[in-house]
Amino acid sequence: MKKLYYEDVHMTEFEATVTECIYDEKKKIYKIVLDQTAFFPEEGGQVADKGTITFAAGGGFEPSTLPLLDAHIKNDIIYHYVEAEIPVGTKVRGKVDWAQRFDFMQQHSGEHVISGLVNQQYGYDNVGFHLGLQEVTLDFNGVLTLEQLREIEVQANEAIWKNLPIHIAFPSSEELASLSYRSKLELTENVRIVTIPGYDICACCAPHVDTTGQIGMIKITNVQSHRGGIRVNILCGGRALQDYTVKQNNAAAISASLSVKQDLIADGVERLKEENFKQKEVVNRLQANVLRNLAMSLPTPEESANAILFVEPMDDIAIRNLINDLVPKYSGYVGVFWGNDTDGYRYIVGSTARDCRELATILRERFGAKGGGKVPMIQGNVVAKEEQLRAIF
């Protein structure tokens, strides 16, 4: 099988002949093998190309076009997944989705620049790589700070500005033995080497852009601890531009809402958080006062073993504090329900004398309540009417 994407990554249309057609019982689709293909399969951490395959169905003259659902490589044979049979010997025309192909080329070449710089400067290896339709992740077997990654990001974009040529080669075994290159596997022959002068030399099977300038830009968007090292998220080219546009729109909206300049929105949000925290403290105190006043209408411990309140929605902390104050005085349950008969109620119930889990079981069995807790206190939500809930107590 000839891999046309190695000969020309810009090839978007090609002709081929079907050499094998297998029905996949498990996936309920057909696996087509062609004598040559420009479709890059899922390989090396990168998902497969998308596109279409067109052919004359049933010997007719009207062509049928099938979407390429997926493509996988096994034992150096590429299987193209389609939803209908294409008989062996059929001439087909494949068309690669260039927008996705170029997007993937930008992402993968950008990953090489980042991984090459990390390897050069810190000695860490890229031990995991995933290039999907939405995100690109790089796993390194060492830890870097955000400041160190920001410096790597600056240098990576400098590589783009230099518009360096990206070289692809299949060196001989002798040449390979004398070459220092990155690789996750021990390779000895038919090794495809991708070189970005001054930045990276790496074994790679995927299509790449012709020059670093075509990557457009590289942006590190996230970093987190991962298996003793770090996982880094990056966006390149069109994805980075789209991400910047979304964030710029969000920044503009937040800026307008807070009436602050865009470069000061973080300070504005922090001030808003502080103001909100202070207001919440005031509200909590007021709610606590309201609950104490409502609690005055409860039966005394001499009049009833249980003390149950139904109130408007309030802060959980204020409700929990009231229950903690009251449970030592009552021999049964002390509970607060807030909500309404139509939408249901949230609740917190406590006791120093009874096992609250028994009550939780009753609420669950009778009304399908959801929640949980321990012996002294439970909480959850339930859809029932007030009179039904009071009847339990």
Image: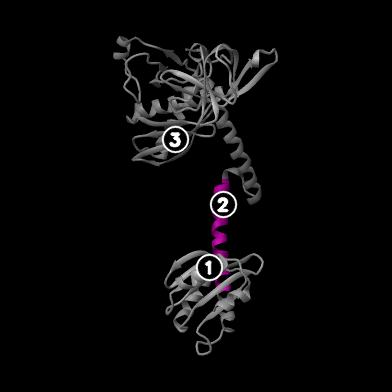
- Residue at 58 percent of width and 77 percent of height: 390
The residue that label 3 is drawn on is: 150
> Residue 385, relative to residue 276: is it above or below?
below
Closer to us: 18 or 163:
18
Which callout, 1 or 3, points at the residue further toward the start of the chain?
Answer: 3
Q: Amino acid at mark 2?
A: Val
The residue that label 1 is drawn on is: 365
- Residue at 55 percent of width and 77 percent of height: 392
Mark nearest the camera among 1 and 3 is 1
Mark nearest the camera among 2 and 1 is 1
> Residue 266, relative to residue 100: is it above or below?
below
Q: Residues within 10 Å of mark 3 (few under 14, many from 20)?
A: few
Closer to us: 33 or 323:
33
Q: Which residues are magenta?
A: 264-287
Figure quadrant of the C terminus? bottom right
The residue that label 2 is drawn on is: 269
Q: Position of residue 260 (x, y in %)?
A: 62, 48
Q: Residues within 10 Å of mark 1 (few under 14, many from 20)?
A: few
> What SS does tag 2 mark?
helix
Left or right for 19, reference 374: right
- Residue at 58 percent of width and 74 percent of height: 389
Q: Are marks 3 and 2 in contact (CB under 8 Å)?
A: no
Whole-Å distance between the Cαs marked 3 and 2? 24 Å
